[in-house]
Image (tube, rainbow, N blue to C red):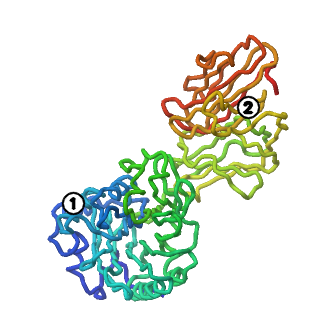
Amino acid sequence: MRQSYPSSKRSGLGPWLLVPLLTLVLAACGEGSAVDPREESANEELSAGGAALGEFRLRLMAANITSGNLQSYDPGHGTRIFQGTKPDVVAIQEFNYGNNSAAAIRGFVDTAFGPGFHYYRETGAQIPNGIISRWPIIASGEWVDPKVGNRDFAWARIDIPGPKDLWVVSVHLLTSGSGVRNEEAVSLVQRIKDNIPTGDYLSIAGDLNTDSRSESCFSTFSQVVTTSGPHPADKNGNVNTNAGRSKPYDHVLVDSDLRAYQTATVIGSSSFSAGLVVDTRVYSPLSEISPAQSGDSGASNMQHMAIIKDFLLPGDDGTTPVGSVTVGSPNGGESWAGGSSQTITWTASGVTQVKLEYTTDGSTWNLISAGTPASAGSYTWVVPGTATTAAKVRVSDAARPSITDTSNAAFTITVVPVPVGAITVETESNNTAATANGRVGAGTSVSGSISTSTDADWFKFTVTEPGTVTVKLTMPGSGDLDWYLFTESDLSFFEVRGYTTSNPEVGTYEAPAAGTYYVKVVGYSGAMSNYSLLVTGAGVQP
């Protein structure tokens, strides 16, 4: 067990720290430089503004994201990733910049994070480990890595808000084999047990170079931190972090005390329930992590992908504000047709964004929306085409999954057999009239997606006799898509269109004769969204 030392929140650092004064200087400025007056000012402001905080978010990152030919952050790719994801505390590897002078390192921290951030960087290492923090580093140092000579284990004790300190150990294990990595883990775990108070929070984070999650080092690390999943993933669900995205090299491991407060990583309208693997090549919309560029994670000699986990911690008053959500509909007993557009409603208090999910079997949950403004109170949902009597909807706080509510009872989803020859799902490529999907049957919903800013989806349907045709395009949330209707004889000029900001986007057309007609779906001004297309009319072929 880790020894139980008094926390510095109550009794100071204690005599067991062997580097009290020098360490404080290193923590503030790195490598023994004189204290930067900007940091003294920032510390004074923190002290003067020490009002109780009810709750605060902590974003932890592991980052071995150097690029270029010199294993540094000079090319700027990693810097933009830091700027776009806004971590609070970073365990950084290969911490080299410019000529590595105190001024160069200080300038890098100012640019990538901000002039109020603190850092510690181990000395005398070819590819040093370090810790960068929004909050003051009150102690720091390095523990010898017994298996490698060009870096050690860098550690820092951080004075985060609230009653506990946060200890972060930045590690970079060897690539030479799983047995060697376990020897490194054994050494580090013993250091942690000997030196870090059990009452404080702990994170071991960095580049473990692990080929799999079954390596013995994880069993060793589990003595002091939790190593079980779920694990952070990118936009496509890939949890691997090496440059080729095939192995789980990088990790943010935390002790059970801190794990209890883990929450979804929310960036813009995107939410990642277990944390985020930052790969700019697949992240969408990229504007959420601006100024990061799409090619940054694929830059020349980019080491790995950064890993993020978020936590919502009690602040200085020791309390966590209470929030609530309540499902309004469907709340049980409803019968909704598969493919139809229905409205999910809820009420919420103390919640910013909600996550929406549904189940058709009572146990497996499927995502509807990762993040929708809680204040909206409703969401237009295209009901899936799965017949069931056990459907339910769940609404949760996107940032605090424990704040949640589910339909009080099951509702029914009915499915009408699809007419022979009719389609229910868009199939790419259908970007032109010549490749249009069809037939869209009367009253049969077709689900599709405008997946890029230049995507266009074409469909065709058959009219057997003249009459009124109604086109209805439904988007989830605030999606803004438009549709255009064409005759087979003129595919250059539309006959009628639905191009307002309405959702659903509905319009009618008086078909003058039997024949084949086309509908094109596009995003307004580059908008992207899923959708459901429904064509109806007495003369439209089922």
Instruction: Decide: is 129 above or below 389.
Output: below
Seen at 77% across and 54% down, the residue is: 361
Q: Which residue is mark 2?
A: 438
Q: Which amino acid, by three-letter code, is at mark 1?
A: Gly
Along the line of sight, the residue nearer the viewer: 474 or 161: 474
- For this orientation, the residue located farthest to the top is 512
Seen at 45% across and 64% down, the residue is: 243
Nearer to us of marks 2 and 1 is 2
Along the line of sight, the residue nearer the viewer: 489 or 520: 489
Mark toward the start of the polypeptide (2 vs 1): 1
| Label at residue 347 | none
Instruction: Decide: is 317 above or below 153.
Output: above
Residue 285 in view in this figure: yes
As helix, strand or loop, the secondary structure at mark 1 comes to helix
Q: Which amino acid, by three-letter code, is at mark 2?
A: Gly
Mark 2 surroundings within 10 Å by alpha-carbon count, few (fewer than 14), some (14 through 19), many (20 or more): many
The percent position of residue 390, horizontal first and vertical second, equals 79, 51
Which quadrant holds the C terminus? top right
The percent position of residue 313, horizontal first and vertical second, equals 45, 64
Along the line of sight, the residue nearer the viewer: 387 or 250: 250
Along the line of sight, the residue nearer the viewer: 234 or 5: 234
* Left or right: 40 as drawn, with respect to 231: left
* Left or right: 512 as drawn, with respect to 431: right
Residue 443 image-quadrant placement:
top right
| Label at residue 107 | 1
As helix, strand or loop, the secondary structure at mark 2 comes to loop
Mark 1 surroundings within 10 Å by alpha-carbon count, few (fewer than 14), some (14 through 19), many (20 or more): some
